[in-house]
Image (spheres, grey):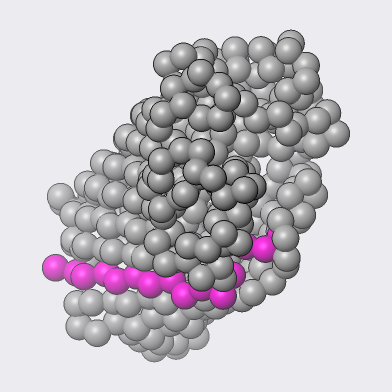
Amino acid sequence: MNFNKLKSLIFILAILVVHAEIKAQTNSLKLQSTAVPFMMISPDARSGGMGNLSLGMTPEANDLFGNTAKLSFLKESKGFLINYTPWLKDLGLSDVYLASAGFYKQLNDQSTINTSLRFFSLGNIDFTDESGNSTLPSQRPSEFSYDIGYSLLLNDKISIGATLRYIHSRLVQGSFGSTAINYKAGNTMSADISMFYKQNSDLQGFHAGLLLSNLGGKISYSNETKNKYYIPANIGLGVGYLNRIDPDNSVEFGIDINRLMVPASPDNTDAESVNQYFSQSVINSYFNSFSAKYGVPFSESLKASVGIEYNYTDRFYLRGGYFMDNNKNLGNMQYFTLGTSFQYQQSKFNISYLVPSGGGITKNPLSNTLRFGSIFFF
C-alpha cells in the first residue's frame, strides 16, 4: 500500500472509528456517529442494484440480511447465500472488503429459521507519522457479526421476524499515540425486529415492510475509559408495488426511508455535553435521537432509497435505483445504482454497480464498484 493510499484509508478509518480522543465536533456540526458502521452497509447485490432498497419489495433470499419477516413467504424452502463487496476500489485497494454468507430453512408452512455472518476487512494498516516513521506495529483491523433469527407467518398476509446478533469489532490494539489507554477489541449484542405485509397472495399490488435493527448495547474499545459508544440502531419503513404485465413479465417499484436512532455527537469542548452524551441509557438514546435538543434535525436525518425491478419469468432481472442522504453536514450524498441477476436451475446470481458520482466527503466508497452475490436453493 503506498503512502497516498494509506493517507486516504486512514482518513476513511478515522471517520469510521469512534474513540474518546476525537476532538472534532462543534456546536454547528450535528452528526450521528456510531461504532461498527459496517452494520449499515447492505451486503447483498440485489438491494445494491436498487439504491439499497429492500424493506417492502417482494421477498428474496437476501432478506435474511435485513427484513427477515419475508423469508416465510419464499417459494424455495431453503437456501445458502454468499455475497462479496469490494470497498474503496477507486483507491486501488484489494484487501478492504465486506463478505457475507447466510442460510435459511423453512421449518413448516408458517415458520423459518435463518443464520448469517458478515465480515468486514479493513486491510493491512501501517501507522506512520508525517516523516514516515512507524508509530505502531502494522495491524489488520476487522469486524464481524453473527446472526440467528426466526420468522413466523401470522396469517396469509402478515409475517414477523426476530434476529439476535453478536458483534465483534477489532480496530486498534495496544496503546495509541501519547495516551496511556490500552485499546482492545469491542464486543456487544443486538437484535432486529421486522414485519412484512402483502396485499395479495400472489404479491400483486402493494406490500410494506418495517425493520428496527441493531437494538442493543453500547460497545467499548478499552477497559480504561468509561466511554461506551452507540451502535447504529435504525428504524426503516418501506413500501413496494408489483404490477404483473402478463404471466411472464412484471415490474416492481419501491421506496425505503431509514433513520438512525442515535443522538447527535457532543461538542467535545464542553465537558457537560460529553458527559450527558455518554451517560444516556440505550433506551433513552433512542427517544433522544428524535428530540430537538439531542438529535439531528429530522429533515436532515433521513436516508431514502427508490428503485425499480423488471422480472422476466423469474429467471432474468434488471434493476435501477437512487439513494439520497439528506444530511447537509455530510454533503447530501446521492448516487445511482444499476443491477441485474439471472437464475439457472437452482442457482441465482446477482450483480450490482454503483455509478461514480461526487467527490471528497460525498464520494461513495463503493463508486465504480461491482458487487457480487449468489444464492443456491435446495
Identify the residue at image location x=39%, y=44%: 139
Identify the residue at image location x=62%, y=48%: 131
Name the quadrant of the C terminus. Answer: bottom left
Q: Nearer the viewer, residue 346 or 249?
A: 346
Residue 111 placement (x, y as % from top left): 23, 47
Task: For residue 230, say whether it is visible.
Answer: no
Give the left or right position of residue 347, taking residue 87 as reference: left
Identify the residue at image location x=56%, y=67%: 91
Give the left or right position of residue 188, taking residue 106 as reference: right
Start-end of magenta stretch: 362-378
Give the left or right position of residue 103, taking residue 186 as reference: left
Give the left or right position of residue 133, taking residue 378 as reference: right
As displayed, is residue 92 above or below residue 28?
below
Identify the residue at image location x=73%, y=33%: 24
Q: Nearer the viewer, residue 50 or 240?
A: 50
Residue 310 placement (x, y as % from top left): 49, 81
Splitting the image into 4 quarters, where does residue 264 fall?
top right
Please tell me whether residue 371 belongs to the stretch shown in magenta. yes
Number of marks drawn: 0
As displayed, is residue 240 above or below residue 246?
above
Task: For residue 77, say whether it is visible.
Answer: yes
